[in-house]
Amino acid sequence: MVTTVLLAVFVAAILAAVVYRHFLPLLRNPGAPRGSFGWPLVGETIGFLRPHASNTTGDFLHSHITRYGAVFKSHLFGAPTVVSCDEELNHFVLQNEERLFQCSYPGPIRGILGGSSLLVVTGERHRRIRGMALAFVASTGLRPAYLADVDRAARAVVASWRGRCAVAFCDEARQFAFGAIVEQVVGLSPEAPLIRRLLEHYSTFMKGLVSLPLNIPGTPYARAVEARRKISLTLEEIMDERWKGDGSSFRKPAFLDVLIANSELSHDDKVTFVLDSLLAGYETTSVLLSMLVYFVGQSPQCLEQLKVEHESIRSSKGTDEFLTAEDYRKMEYTQRVINETLRCGNIVKFVHRKALKDVKYKGYVIPAGWKVLPILGSVHLDPALYKNPQEFDPCRWEGLDQTSSGKKFAPFGGGLRLCPGSELGKVEAAFFLHHLVLQYGWRSDGEYVPMAHPYVEFSKGLPIEIWCHQQSDTAPWFVGQQL
């Protein structure tokens, strides 16, 4: 009997401690914005992460904004949090990186990405690794060789649809994006055995990146940790071949040469840089392409205007000519379509930050140590900033600044952490659209909407029906060709 009573007292004390620790930040910080902390341990994380159409804010944000306003407190990812759906505060947070706020992603994400990932490093280390990323972008830029590679990759994917009446477009978009980024970073053909192995491990890695952080054998998270180890070994093998110069499958110089020659970077730094490049150049670009096909497919008028623009560009070139930087600059309507897709689709819904000190803003206090989540997507869908925000309307960008960083429009983040390769992704998307709209028409079922998990995903890989504008029994000249 005494043992039972003692056990009950012990359990009650543990529960009381958990409840006290959960709600203590509320008592200590009365100046924080209004809001709710939810249940002890889980807070409101489950509701926050509940999937919803990516061109909506979702039930959680809608209900909290209605009840508390555009800035509110919550308890997310195991920590007291200020959630911002306000354009001014979002901009303020992003522009004060390392002064008032600091990147602060959950530990499990760090565990998979690696401690050297550009997404999670801070301070001087972030500046050094970001410098490498900017060097990569500068070495790629709008160089003719890079643009030819992208053009060729787009043509090859589109040409592979000959004789088919349907495709799972997300897979096609990943094939195109992976081929483009791998050639630039590693210098290998996507068909090389080592690259096929790398892609297999990377697919497992990505599934774990967005899974529950349970490092138990057999779980997606545990498999992702193991996949990262295998990716490291594969990249080490690639770098060894590259360093020795005896790899017959290596086609041309690549940024990997710069990484290998950099004695200041550890092996893990180099592996992580390649992973970051794949994450940005493969996953983000492929999602952007999939959303473009979805939204444009729902708008016949938009598709027709795209065709007119790209027919005009192609009419000034030979059939076999690759697209150039000058052609890209002529794609004005295409840029509007891409920006509207980024606004509606919201590839990056939010970012993780932490307050380094108490920050006073518009009458309330963001306490030191609290997480801050600027919700970029909520600003893109704010009816006070955009007329009919859930309507896909590329014409709203006519006459406006087409840059992808600002208070109202920040699809790639902002400040010191603005995505270095955002323009490369837009170039690749524009070139793929060029060949797609000139050669094919397509139709998708309206039920396959982009869903935020919070990462964007399409049900069943976005199946679409396709039909060719011009039939041909001969293979295009560019399939299998190399520069």
Image (spheres, helix red, strand yellow):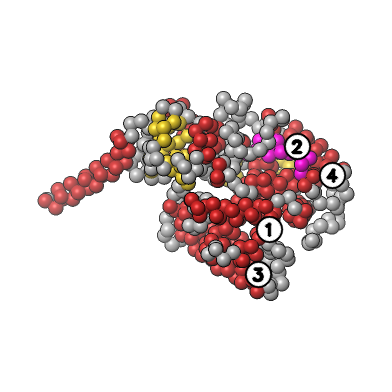
Q: Which mark is residue 8?
A: none
Q: Nearer the viewer, residue 1 or 56?
A: 56
Q: Amino acid at mark 4?
A: Arg
**Lower position in the chain sequence, tag 4 or tag 3:** 3
Element class at badge 2: helix
- Residue 80, image x, y percentages: 38, 40
Query: Which sits earlier in the primary sequence, circle 1 or circle 3?
Result: 1
Q: Secondary structure at mark 1?
A: helix
How far apart are the alpha carbons under marks 4 and 1?
Answer: 26 Å
Q: Position of residue 432 (x, y in %)?
A: 73, 47
Residue at the image point whose x is 75% and y is 32% from the top? 301
Which residue is nearer to you in this view: 57 or 146?
Answer: 146
Which label was assigned to residue 314?
A: 4
Q: Is residue 442 visible?
A: yes
Q: Which mark is residue 184?
A: 1
Q: Which residues are magenta?
A: 328-342
Numbered mark located on residue 242 in the image: 3
Q: Identity of the amino acid at label 2? A: Glu
Q: Is residue 346 left or right of residue 141?
A: left
- Of the 4 image quadrants, the one containing the C terminus is bottom right
In this rendered view, identify the residue nearer to me: 431 or 276.
Answer: 276
Q: Residue at x 57, y 66 (%)?
A: 263
Q: Few, some or many C-alpha atoms within 10 Å of disc 4 (few <14, some 14-19, many ≥20)?
A: some
- Residue type indicated by callout 3: Arg
Q: Magenta segment: does it hold 299?
A: no
- Is residue 331 highlighted in magenta? yes
Q: Residue under label 2, please give it.
A: 332
Residue 128 image offset from top left, x and y in percent: 55, 55
Q: Decide: few, some or many residues near mark 1? Use Cα within 10 Å; few <14, some 14-19, many ≥20.
A: many
